[in-house]
Amino acid sequence: MEWYCSIAHQPISSEMILNLNVTVNCNALFVVIWLSPRSAFELWGHGRTHSELRNSLLKYPTENMSPFLQKDSTYKINVYTFNKTLEFEDRIKKIDAMEYLSFEGRVNLRNPKHIFCLLEDYGTDPNDIPDEPLYIYFGRWIADGQRELIRSHSVKKRHFIGNTSMDAGLSFIMANHARVKAHDLVYDPFVGTGSLLVACSHFGAYVCGTDIDYNTIHGIGKASRKNQKWRGPDENIRANLRQYGSEKLYVDVLVSDASKPIWRDGVLFDTIITDPPYGIRESTRRTGSQKDSVNSVKPSEDYHVPVSMAYHLSDIFTDLLNFSAHHLVIGGRLVYWLPIYRPEYCEEMVPLNACLRLVSNCEQTLSSHTSRRLITMEKIKEPEETDVLAHLSDPHFSPYQGHNAFREKYFSGISKRTLTGKEETNKMQAHYQI
């Protein structure tokens, strides 16, 4: 499977195509990238000139081409140009020049069975457009992307939001990495305001989640919107799904501590998708008891008062992977964000589990020194007793303790930038005083 970028003329990450939310099975695909992934095509030929394109097309296997060129089929050919506008007559000439392809079906411009596309790339500089294209592609159209979902599901228009509500675009990318489909059961153990549940329900999945924050789950307390002090009576996750017409897919959300799973053995999810707290805008907390707290007050004999305790990032990811190993179906996927201090990053920092296969690891840069990586894993087997011994003996399965210092490293980087800025200001002031 090959993926081509029409701007860079080189292979790109296969996970980018998941933004299109299509399932394809063909020998070669390429993505048209114009600001973001927009369409997917089966690549039949490409070249720097129309002569190179012809030679490339004539080398394409006939057995792959012939099913779409039959007499009983209908088709049309579209011409797309990037960074240049062609007159209608010029487009027709380019289509007629491709008569060397043995199309036997009938042309149907309104409702064709197959759509083919000729794409010409004229670069990215609108002030320096070449007379001839820099690169040319020809292929069979597979599917268009769904970029309109980012606008229609924008958190700016959403009924219920919080300080850490996931961006709509990233939510849909995560849902596609997880291969969410109709009738799946999706679970988010750090559900927050439910942005990931909204995205997954769009694709027809039943959704549920838990969170330790009572106020967020029940939609009460201070509002996150500007000029609004308190949340309204109907601001909750269920109202968000109702807003997008998917309330029937809402299972429920519960107040629960992710370090103490509430699910009985045998409860299986098709997908676990989440964005754990990093300790930056949301604290990483878990519940405990007075005996777990160093500075605890002597507990009352009449009742138990839970204590909020630190929940280290290394423990969060260990618990998340262990939970997924026990509660995902075989072939089910775990998709989550892993915060990283970039100067120290290496592949060994990514948590592993004997029951989960690492599918992809994609980086989103947050600053010069921090990023987060979208980790996608797939369950390949059920847990066994030997896995416990393997996790204890194999250092690859040991939790990376460096994650626990992410908060300190994050803010130390901000302090350094602030300090550097002040030093530059002082230098400039001293210069002008002289």
Image (spheres, helix red, strand yellow):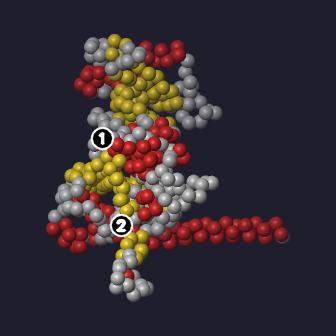
The CA distance from mark 1 to mark 2 is 28 Å
Secondary structure of the residue carrying numbered label 2: loop
Q: Position of residue 94 (x, y in %)?
A: 46, 18
Amino acid type of disc 2? Asp
Nearer to the camera, 205 or 172:
205
Residue 257, label in figure: 2
Q: Is 223 left or right of 206, judged from the image as shown?
A: right
In which quarter of the view is residue 16 placed?
top left
Is disc 1 placed on a helix, strand or loop?
A: loop
For the question of whether residue 164 can be seen, the reply is no
Q: Which sits earlier in the primary sequence, circle 1 or circle 2?
A: 1
User: Residue lying furthest left in this view?
Assistant: 385
Q: Position of residue 196 (x, y in %)?
A: 40, 50
> Which mark is drawn over residue 182?
1
Q: Residue furthest bottom?
A: 298
Image vertical order of residue 226 relative to residue 9, above or below: below
Front-most of 346 and 59?
A: 346
Left or right of 127? Residue 276 is: left
